[in-house]
């Protein structure tokens, strides 16, 4: 599983002109599911996203996770292209999980974050989405398991 986590001032996802997910300050998470991922990996990923300490403390150091900083907003968007193989100029996506595996694991990450008190907005799995964000920092972290 791969996640690109960006600290944002605000972010939204639009499908066919309709905003389907929108957050203020928090994390925009682009989440890719690998064909060999498991529920254990999804739990690890959710925990890692929620605990990521990339908000500044009172000393200006990146030392606070979103909850501790008071920004418990997550916009989680599925993105199979994170597993694009670019060994040729036309990417291949054979390492990305098929929907029958990817959807439940994507939904598991969302559910685990919600269960811990995060406000979670999402895109729509498999839809053509427009993602808009204002990066804060910019701070962007790649998490992989």
Image (cartoon, helix red, strand yellow):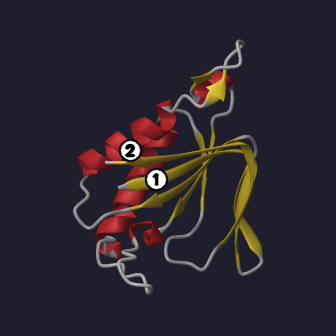
Label 1: state its secondary structure.
Answer: strand
142 is higher (above) or lower (below) than 60: below
Report which residue position mark 1 lands on: 3
Q: Residue at x 48, y 40 (%)?
A: 49
Q: Residue at x 57, y 27 (%)?
A: 65
Residue density around tag 2, few if under 14, some if 14–19, many if 20 or more, within 10 Å: many
Quarter of the image for residue 138 reads top right
- Image x and y of residue 47, in percent: 41, 36
Label 1, label 2: how many angstroms apart (C-alpha)?
8 Å
How many badges with numbers are in the image? 2
Label 2: state its secondary structure.
Answer: helix
- Image x and y of residue 118, in percent: 57, 37
Answer left or right for 18 relative to 107. right
Q: Residue at x 35, y 61 (%)?
A: 104
Quarter of the image for residue 100 reads bottom left
Answer left or right for 67 relative to 138. left
Q: Quadrant of the N terminus?
A: bottom left
- Image x and y of residue 58, in percent: 72, 13
11 is higher (above) or lower (below) than 91: above
Q: Residue at x 54, y 28 (%)?
A: 53
Q: Nearer the viewer, residue 55 or 70?
A: 55
Q: Nearer the viewer, residue 89 or 127?
A: 89
Report which residue position mark 2 lands on: 45
17 is higher (above) or lower (below) than 59: below
Residue contact between numbered discs 1 and 2, judged by CB atoms under 8 Å: yes
């Amino acid at each position: 599983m791969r996640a690109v986590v960006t600290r944002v001032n605000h972010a939204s996802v639009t499908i066919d002109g309709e905003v389907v997910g929108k957050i203020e300050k928090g994390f925009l998470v682009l989440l890719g599911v690998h064909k060999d991922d498991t529920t254990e990996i999804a739990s690890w990923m959710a925990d890692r996203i929620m605990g990521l300490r990339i908000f500044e403390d009172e000393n200006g150091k990146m030392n606070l996770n979103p909850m501790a900083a008071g920004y418990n907003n997550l916009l989680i968007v599925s993105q199979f292209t994170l597993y694009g193989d670019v060994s040729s100029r036309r990417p291949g996506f054979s390492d990305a999980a098929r929907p029958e595996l990817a959807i439940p694991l994507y939904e598991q990450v969302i559910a685990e974050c919600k269960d811990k008190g995060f406000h979670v907005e999402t895109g729509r799995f498999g839809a053509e989405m427009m993602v808009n964000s204002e990066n804060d920092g910019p701070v962007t972290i790649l998490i992989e398991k």
